[in-house]
Amino acid sequence: MKIRTGIGYDVHQFAEGRKCILGGVDIPHTVGLLGHSDADVLCHAIADAILGALGLPDIGYYFPPNDDSIEGISSLDILKKCKMLADEKGAELQNVDSALVAEAPKILPHLAEMKANIANALNLVPEDIGIKATTNETMGFVGRREGIAAMATCCLIIHKS
Ligand SMILES: Nc1ccn([C@@H]2O[C@H](COP(=O)(O)O)[C@@H](O)[C@H]2O)c(=O)n1
Ligand SMILES: C[C@@]1(CO)OP(=O)(O)OP(=O)(O)OC[C@H]1O
């Protein structure tokens, strides 16, 4: 048995006319997030944390940004793929922890729904999913409201030798 951890980080910029989807929740906001996918920066950081813990290549390897067939893909489906890859490796995901850095929108009112979505995609329970949010105290690109950053960690147990 092996215990492994992973870390993931992602950034998406704000853009007019896009949705602001975080943890699979379409959060009402004046601008949305730009991306080839649904641009769910939180799910992308979590996906990379899981892939890292599995010793696999990163999200862009499995979901190339130049692949037209995945344009607009739901990042919850990306998490489902990560769960499948974990299953194939005999890995049991234990928990995910994460942090969003954004001046706006307010994340707190949506936390429960976000945790439920992510837990559902990964076949975990909401208590296994940590999500924190903080502003960047007006500093840097996040502080200027140009985008959102997310970071995530995870822990898993690999049962196969
Ligand atoms: N986008 C955000 C940012 C923050 N929160 C919540 O507000 C608390 C205080 O944030 P500070 O950056 O001022 O320390 C933070 O702990 C979160 O609970 C939020 O919901 N959405
Ligand atoms: C899933 C992908 C697919 O294009 O999503 P993007 O919206 O391009 O987001 P990014 O975090 O820049 O890179 C991950 C990509 O693989």
Image: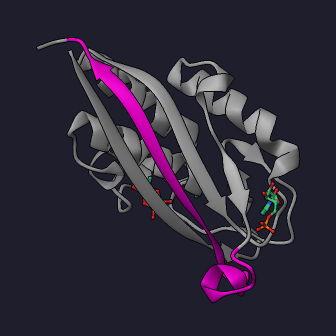
Q: Quadrant of the N terminus?
A: top left
- Which region shows up in magenta? 136-159
Residue at image point 39% right, 45% down: 49
Establish if 28 lies above or below 117.
Answer: below
Q: Is residue 60 magenta?
A: no
Percent x, y of residue 102: 71, 68
Residue at image point 61% right, 69% down: 34
Establish if 116 lies above or below 21.
Answer: above
Establish if 149 lies above or below 40.
Answer: below
Q: In the image, 28: left or right of 8?
A: right
Percent x, y of residue 138: 74, 85
- Check the image and name the residue furthest to the left: 161
Where's ligand 2: which quadrant?
Answer: bottom left
> Quadrant of the rendered structure where residue 91 is?
top left
Percent x, y of residue 23: 66, 43
Please tell me how many numbered marks the rendered image carries.
Answer: 0
Q: Is residue 155 magenta?
A: yes
Residue at image point 59% right, 26% down: 128
Q: Quadrant of the C terminus?
A: top left
Q: In the image, 141: left or right of 37?
A: right
Observer-nearest of 29 and 124: 124
Percent x, y of residue 130: 62, 38
